[in-house]
């Protein structure tokens, strides 16, 4: 087989597996709070049920890297798909909200470990020289899942009820188990199997700058994803949902191209323009007053985070040896969890005290942190190269 071939059978299967997992995630997540309130939960309790998933995912993420480096990544993917399958069918038959909460915890843990194991397994199946491009394509599963999942979930629950929705999502994951069995082997690196357990098995120090950087980008998206519809309605903008449609289209075009450029010309060529696009887009959204402006800045934002994320993730994977790819990916993805989780909280606090414009403008200091972190990392890398030219 050509060593530089990207579209191998295993890479395609891995993409489909992740697509199915994300589709079920986006089918269920938007309706959890509504389902809980219909079962008698208060708004506060409904928020806890919805938020428990991400809280567990954040807590599980560091352990997911350790697991992915010590156990066959294929087996980890299979086990976490099984966990998600049990959780989804469990939602359908939960006799009360306490059981539903327990299955949310299982689902959140499975989701976190699954995401890390898939990202680590991708390093087994993607040629190193095309890693940015490959991760860009793999990232399209988030775009497609986010575009199709909520619409399917709402349509099924409205037409047939919540238990049917949960059962359909569980059936998707059952099919995913069968698909996972066809995935190629991902052997455990010999070095991992012989190592003693230490702090470095859970957090990659080398990847920490990238965790901070991607957290900054995801903070912005957490704010936009939560509040842009509300802001559009407040400003009398009809059809604001088109912001997400055109953003998704731009992401689909941009992600693989940005990854390919980073592979061939280096991370900085992609990163610095992405920071500019991200910052300008967020400032533009702060003052947008019509649909054309919102859509235009939504597209520009896709050339910010959408371009930076696969390039950063590919570079992050190369910071560690193959036997530590799992912990590198888990550290990076922990940044996305933190950003997506804190973004709505920060945005709501700023909007309540200073208004919507200030909420989006807070991205300027956020992106300044991302820029400074990257510059410091680049200088540290250059200094190490000067001090150790042979390496």
Image (spheres, grey):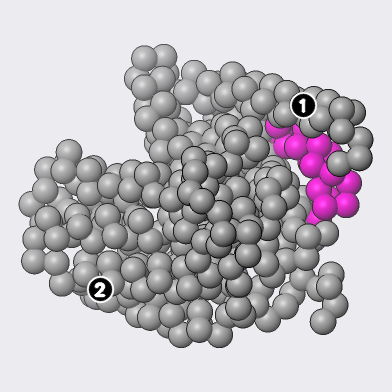
- Marks 2 and 1 close (CB-CB < 8 Å): no
Q: Quadrant of residue 93?
A: bottom left
The residue lying at 78 percent from left, 65 percent from top is 127
Q: Position of residue 260 (x, y in %)?
A: 81, 55
Q: Is residue 276 magenta?
A: yes
Q: Secondary structure at mark 2?
A: helix
The answer to which of 198 and 60 lies nearer the viewer is 198
Image quarter where the C terminus lies is: top right
**Which residues fall within the magenta stretch?**
260-277
Magenta residues, dominant SS class: helix
Image quarter where the N terminus lies is: bottom right
Neighbourhood count class around disc 2 (C-alpha, 10 Å): few under 14, some 14–19, many 20 upward? many
Q: Secondary structure at mark 1?
A: helix
Above or below for 309 versus 124: above
Label 2, label 1: how far apart the Cα atoms are: 49 Å
The circle on residue 39 is none
Asked if residue 102 lies left or right of residue 127, the reply is: left
Above or below for 54 versus 5: above
The circle on residue 380 is 1
Q: Position of residue 2 (x, y in %)?
A: 85, 77
């Amino acid at each position: 087989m050509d060593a530089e071939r990207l579209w191998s059978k295993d890479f395609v299967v891995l993409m489909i597996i992740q697509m199915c997992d994300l589709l079920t995630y986006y089918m269920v997540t938007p309706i959890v709070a509504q389902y809980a309130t219909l079962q008698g939960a208060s708004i506060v309790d409904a928020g806890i049920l919805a938020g428990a998933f991400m809280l567990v995912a954040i807590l599980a993420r560091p352990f997911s890297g350790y697991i992915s480096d010590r156990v066959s990544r294929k087996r980890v993917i299979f086990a976490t798909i099984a966990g998600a399958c049990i959780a989804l069918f469990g939602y359908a038959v939960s006799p009360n909200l306490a059981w539903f909460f327990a299955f949310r915890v299982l689902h959140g843990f499975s989701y976190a470990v699954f995401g890390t194991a898939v990202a680590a397994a991708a390093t087994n199946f993607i040629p190193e020289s095309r890693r940015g491009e490959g991760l860009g394509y793999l990232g399209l599963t988030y775009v497609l899942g986010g575009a199709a999942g909520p619409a399917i979930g709402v349509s099924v629950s409205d037409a047939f009820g919540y238990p049917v929705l949960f059962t359909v999502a569980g059936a998707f994951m059952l099919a995913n188990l069968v698909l996972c069995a066809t995935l190629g082997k991902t052997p455990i690196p010999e070095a991992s199997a012989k190592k003693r357990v230490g702090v470095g098995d859970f957090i990659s120090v080398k990847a920490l700058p990238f965790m901070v950087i991607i957290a900054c980008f995801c903070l912005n998206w957490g704010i936009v994803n939560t509040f842009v519809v509300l802001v559009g309605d407040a400003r009398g903008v009809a059809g604001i949902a088109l912001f997400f449609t055109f953003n998704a289209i731009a992401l689909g075009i941009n992600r693989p191209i940005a990854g390919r450029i980073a592979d061939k010309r280096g991370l900085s060529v992609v990163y610095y323009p992405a920071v500019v696009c991200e910052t300008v887009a967020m400032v533009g959204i702060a003052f947008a007053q019509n649909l054309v402006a919102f859509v235009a800045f939504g597209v520009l934002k896709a050339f910010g985070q959408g371009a930076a994320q696969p390039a950063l993730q590919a570079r992050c994977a190369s910071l560690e040896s193959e036997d530590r790819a799992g912990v590198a990916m888990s550290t990076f993805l922990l940044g996305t969890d933190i950003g997506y989780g804190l973004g709505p909280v920060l945005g709501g606090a700023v909007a309540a005290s200073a208004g919507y414009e200030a909420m989006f403008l807070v991205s300027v200091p956020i992106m300044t942190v991302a820029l400074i972190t990257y510059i410091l990392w680049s200088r540290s890398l250059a200094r190490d190269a000067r001090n150790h030219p042979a390496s």
